[in-house]
Image (cartoon, rainbow, N blue to C red):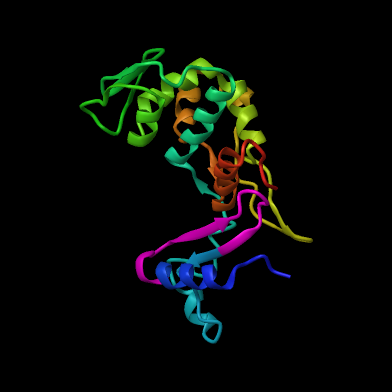
Amino acid sequence: VLTLDRELQSICETVGAQYINKGAIVIMDPSTGKLLACASFPSYDPDNVAESLTDERGPLLNRCFAAFPVGSTFKVTLAAAALDMGIDAGASYDCTGWIDVSGQPFKCHLLSGHGVIDMKKAMVESCNTYFINLGGQLGAEKIVDYAQNLGFGRQTELAPGLTSAAGLLPKASELPNPADVANLSFGQGRLLATPVQLCQMVAAVVNGGKTPI
């Protein structure tokens, strides 16, 4: 028996077909981990599979369960780890548009800088340098541990014999340099995850800390 909600699935497929060239929409019940909608785009015509085989957009790839670069969505993991470890979310940080990490400069997406911000503002503005600084405070082992607890780096069982991609979460030992930790802190580097894993991450935040598997 599928956990999909027929109405939600229909909405996702209709909206996605209009606005998404390549991507996916996944809706999860955060309290149970049940997938209520999973739509991958572009979709394919089952009556004309040959056409899909030659489509460079890869419609036969189910992007809901495939792994991709994570990017700034990973900042949710950093924030959750920091809050759990007792780091003050209201502490001020001055984003000048770049940050020096052991001699390696990292730029914020806002080159002029966000100015003085706290965690909430950094999340709203998706400030790279804030989370790079936060990652330096947490360290590689803590970041990787929390990411593992939130579901990164392991397959999600969708049904007996059916799993999503595991993605890729580097080991702490594979992040020997501060610059490697800085890259991971805002979702860059070798980090890969599926849309389902990202849903698991957010679900754990909104349901009080339980990662749905």
Relative depth, front residue between 121 and 76: 121
Residue, x 45% and y 29% (percent of image)? 183
For the N terminus, give its image quadrant: bottom right
The x and y percentages for residue 51 are 47, 80
Q: Name the residue furthest top.
A: 102
Frontmost residue, 36 versus 16: 36
Q: Give the residues in magenta.
A: 17-37
Rendered position, 96 above or below 64: above
Count of marks overlaid on the render: 0
Question: What residue sits 51% from the left and 29% below the top?
Answer: 78
**Looking at the picture, how far across and down is residue 39, in whole percent?**
52, 66
Residue beneath the point at 60% across and 36% down: 169
Q: Looking at the picture, tell me which residue is in the foreground, 101 or 25.
A: 25
Q: Examine the image and state in which quarter residue 158 appears.
A: bottom right
Question: Relative to residue 142, is residue 167 depicted above or below?
Answer: below
Task: Looking at the picture, tell me which residue is in the foreground, 205 or 147.
Answer: 205
Residue 189 visible in rendering? no
| Left or right of 157, for residue 127 | left
Looking at the image, the residue that sits furthest to the bottom is 47
Q: In this view, does 143 lie to the left or right of 102?
A: right
x, y percent for residue 85: 58, 19
* Residue 30 belongs to magenta span: yes
Which quadrant holds residue 209?
Answer: top right
Q: Does residue 115 lie above or below 49 as drawn?
A: above
Judge from the rendering whether residue 73 lies leftward or rightward of residue 112; answer left or right: right
Q: Does the magenta stretch include residue 142?
A: no
